[in-house]
Image: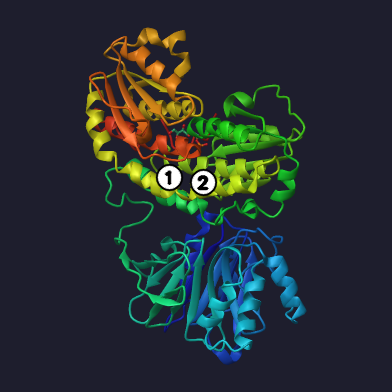
Amino acid sequence: MCGIVGAIAQRNVSDILLEGLKRLEYRGYDSAGMALIDDPEKGISTIKTVGKVAKLVEAAHKRDASGKLGIAHTRWATHGRITRANAHPHGSGDRISLVHNGIIENHESLRQELAAAGYRFATQTDTEVIAHLIRQALENGASSLLEAVTSAIAKLRGAFGLCVIDRQQPDRLVVARCGMSLVIGDGIGGENFVASDPLALGQVTDRFIYLEEGDVAQLTCDSIEVWNGGRRVKREIATLSGKASEMDKGGYQHFMQKEIFEQPQAIRDTLSGRVSGDHVLEEAFGVEAGKIFDKVEQVQIVACGTSFHAGLVAKYWLESIARMPCQVDIASDYRYRDIIVQPGTLFVAVSQSGETADTLAALRYAADRKHVATLAICNVATSSLVRESDFCLLTMAGQEIGVASTKAFTTQLTLLLILAIVLGRRNGLAGKDEARLVRDMNRLPELVDRTLKLDGEIRKLSKQFSDKNHSLFLGRGIQYPVAKEGALKLKEISYIHAEAYPAGELKHGPLALVDSDMPVIVVAPNNDLLDKLRSNLSEVSARGGKLYVFADEGIGLESDRGCKVINLPGCPEVLDPILFTVPLQLLSYHAAIIKGTDIDHPRNLAKSVTVE
Ligand code: F6R
């Protein structure tokens, strides 16, 4: 995922830009670049390198790069190969230079129009059309860079975050946001900044303006003006505490708690640049991904622990949305099996860390065995899994520190749903159905946010677990893996023994365990299996079992003596597994607090299991 940094100041900004890029390395990239204006008479000085930011730093220092206005970028290739020429910034003439995150879907037609009008293209990127459109607007009479950018972006379709400089207006920087996050850093004493993540600017400011959809802003040394829909708008400045970083708890008691509450933003960041208004942006998977997806007839998912549970949920989506067979295996098992690979199989490794020994070994095993390709769904751009897979899609969860995986799981699910849609397109998923799914997905951050408001209620409920040593988690269909994930969370951080069962299996054995000492936790969404689930609840109640039901508010289930109901906001069915995971995370967290365990470092466990 690309990263943007921009700065305007009364001092040299090149080291600020380079430091910003280093801080964005976690997003994953394959090349980097920077453009600076020092003396406008001498033009824009641009430096680009393929590979690590460290190479760009070396090149910049060698050239003694300096300027009081500058933009910088880390590129993760989507259109055009990984080359120096395709790295950002991109320019038009010797006047405009810009950096761009996202995908311009109508770049082909714009390219043809601009080429016919005499604009020459030096790269294979979708971005270059934006630079030419801005110059064209200026040549056609736009009175300012702001006006030119506003007129250029009106012609774009897709998702973008932009940062633009103009040699003839060296006292300003113009930025625009549409579908990709962008923040302005309000600097101290005559300087201002912009970046795709506030993390990039932590060295220079703690005051940020989060741009909203459709915002265009002009930054000078002394002013920040934001426009939306042609009107000047006011945006609040948020102060991030001096300590706020991914490495501190930001006011929460534990990293796990912080990470649970970060999920709305983590999902938003994961969707950003991957979906547009009504469709998935397939190019986000990489330059060659479309050709690979065309060949896929089935999917093999391999993972461990929580990531394995994400794979189990995805199987339901791949069957129902992509109409494709899907097999899901535990990596430590898969790597030693004498596997049979059907023609047209896409191998997908899911991992938060990308360093899990078994998952890596499974990937290496699969790589030798005629899969269509290997895809990593991973949270760490620099990990071995990402490096060794044919292509990857990064969960943008940010660093996960708590040993118990939370935001990595819900963002993995978000990407696996996107994968199901991309494959579904090739297998009869209608455009209107894709549009509905994308609309549903765009509601996720807000729905997760509302679900997190149940925290107080769940904290009270968790008190009833203080004297319990065993528990049973039940779910039907796609909610069975969610129940499994809930049970894993509870056991690993509270040390309460927890088992998950498909609710339909109850009477085939586990019902024998049910008595008043065995809490039974149930996830009850509003779907076709609801009536069957109700029968399973009666089976538990009839045996004196105590039920804790997380239910969709639409089903009208009410608490009674043997059954405590917590209502979740109603949501589109496809989102159920993501939404119902959240209260189970909170339940485990609060149960562990009562048990007094070391929540972020549960006994005997490590965050990254790099040994077999
Ligand atoms: C549970 C948990 C583990 C990991 C598993 C795989 O909360 O965190 O079960 O999910 O060790 O790790 P990754 O996803 O890094 O491959």
**Quadrant for the C terminus in the image:** top right
User: What residue sits 42% from the left and 81% below the top?
Assistant: 9
Residue 404 appears in view? no
Can you give x and y, in whole percent of width and height, for residue 525 in the image?
42, 31
Please, what secondary structure does the residue beneath circle 2 have?
A: loop
Residue 231 appears in view? yes
Q: Residues within 10 Å of mark 2 (few under 14, many from 20)?
A: many
User: What residue sits 51% from the left and 38% below the top?
Assistant: 574
**Which residue is label 1 attached to?**
400
Q: Residues within 10 Å of mark 1 (few under 14, many from 20)?
A: many
- Determine which quarter of the picture holds residue 65: bottom right
User: What residue sits 43% from the left and 26% below the top?
Assistant: 483
**Which residue is label 2 attached to?**
379
Decide which of tag 2 and tag 1 comes sooner along the chain. Answer: 2
* Amino acid type, residue under disc 2 in the picture: Asn
Above or below residue 590? Residue 400 is: below
Q: Are marks 2 and 1 in contact (CB under 8 Å)?
A: yes
* Amino acid type, residue under disc 1 in the picture: Glu
- Determine which quarter of the picture holds residue 45: bottom right
Can you give x and y, in whole percent of width and height, for residue 332 in the image?
58, 26
Above or below residue 254? Residue 485 is: above
Mark 2 C-beta to ligand 1 under 8 Å: yes
Can you give x and y, in whole percent of width and height, for residue 310 in the image?
52, 34
Above or below residue 374? Residue 5 is: below
Please, what secondary structure does the residue beneath circle 1 have?
A: loop
Query: Along the horizontal axis of the image, is 43 left or right of 518?
Result: right
Per the model, the C-alpha gap separating discs 2 and 1 is 9 Å
Can you give x and y, in whole percent of width and height, for residue 264 in the image?
40, 49
